[in-house]
Amino acid sequence: MTWFRDLRKRQPNRPLWRIAIWQFMQSMSWLYLLVLYRTRSWGVRNIPDEGPVLLLSNHQSFYDPILIGFGCSKRHFYSLARHTLFTTPIAKLFQRVSNAIPVEQGAGDTKAIKKCIEVLKDDQTLMLFPEGARTMTGDVEKFETGAMLIIKRAKPTVVPVALEGVYDVWPRGQSKPKWSGRLGVMFGEPIPAEELLAMKADAAMDMVRDRVDAMRSEIAERIGKK
């Protein structure tokens, strides 16, 4: 069956039940974002069908991973999450199903970094927020250079990702989201790892950040924010 082959192709090394649960959660999230926020996505074709892919995105809200999943339906991705979120059996199960990699923030977690490299060397997709934390203002903050170590070790194709509208719906410091708004996600032109590694780390991350910020402005125009 075509749908079965497609599921298996997306992550050949994962149990089918985990892939199926991911698909279900993604479908529910897609419906939620589409109905409540009239969410739109652009540039999905820029995500390679095969090989290691590193998605580097700005970070506006708790909604961000869900919004990226809304647009990135062709590849299941791994992401980092605070280890304190996974202290109960149910939370640990969710961690496994959602491809979350526990990390101790601010502690230089070498175990999490090794897992990220392992994921990419297995030709999977990893999503990171190089800002390190949610923005306080809605603007794109400086991209830290930690991702360059992962790029150097795993040589993934890097895809810049821009999110817009999410800060207005659920900004940092607000306990609950608003139930209306407009959201958008855009995937930029892929960047070969070699191109970034030929640059100094700061310059490479600044280039990715500038592309993300330019796309964010474009999304704002498309969803009527400007």
Image (cartoon, grey):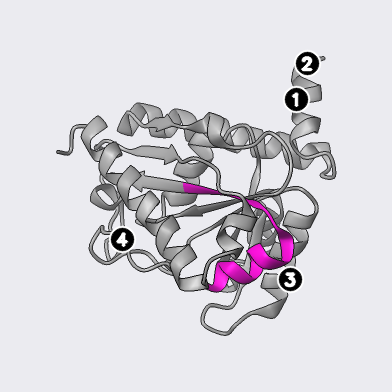
Mark 4 against mark 2, which lies toward the viewer?
2
Mark 3 against mark 1, which lies toward the viewer?
3
Under mark 3, the amino acid is Lys
Task: List the residue tagged with mark 4.
Answer: 175
Task: List the residue tagged with mark 3.
Answer: 114
Q: CA distance from mark 3 to mark 1?
A: 28 Å
Horizontally, is 57 left or right of 113 in the view? left
Quadrant of the image occupied by residue 112: bottom right
Q: Residue at x 27, y 67 (%)?
A: 136
Q: Position of residue 165 (x, y in %)?
A: 28, 44
Residue 7 visible: yes
Which class describes the residues within 10 Å of circle 4: few (<14), some (14-19), or many (20+)? few
Which class describes the residues within 10 Å of circle 2: few (<14), some (14-19), or many (20+)? few
Q: Position of residue 207 (x, y in %)?
A: 42, 58
- Residues at circles 2 and 1 in contact by the CB criterion of under 8 Å: yes
Residue 148 is one of the magenta-drawn residues: yes
Between 113 and 26, the residue placed more toward the observer is 113
Secondary structure found at label 4: loop
Q: CA distance from mark 4 to mark 1?
A: 38 Å
Mark toward the start of the polypeptide (3 vs 4): 3
Under mark 2, the amino acid is Thr
- Residues at circles 4 and 1 in contact by the CB criterion of under 8 Å: no
- Residues at circles 3 and 2 in contact by the CB criterion of under 8 Å: no
Which class describes the residues within 10 Å of circle 3: few (<14), some (14-19), or many (20+)? few
Task: List the residue tagged with mark 2.
Answer: 2
- On-image quarter of the N terminus: top right
Q: Residue furthest front?
A: 198
Task: List the residue tagged with mark 1.
Answer: 6
Secondary structure found at label 3: helix
Mark toward the start of the polypeptide (3 vs 2): 2
Mark toward the start of the polypeptide (3 vs 1): 1
Q: CA distance from mark 3 to mark 4?
A: 33 Å
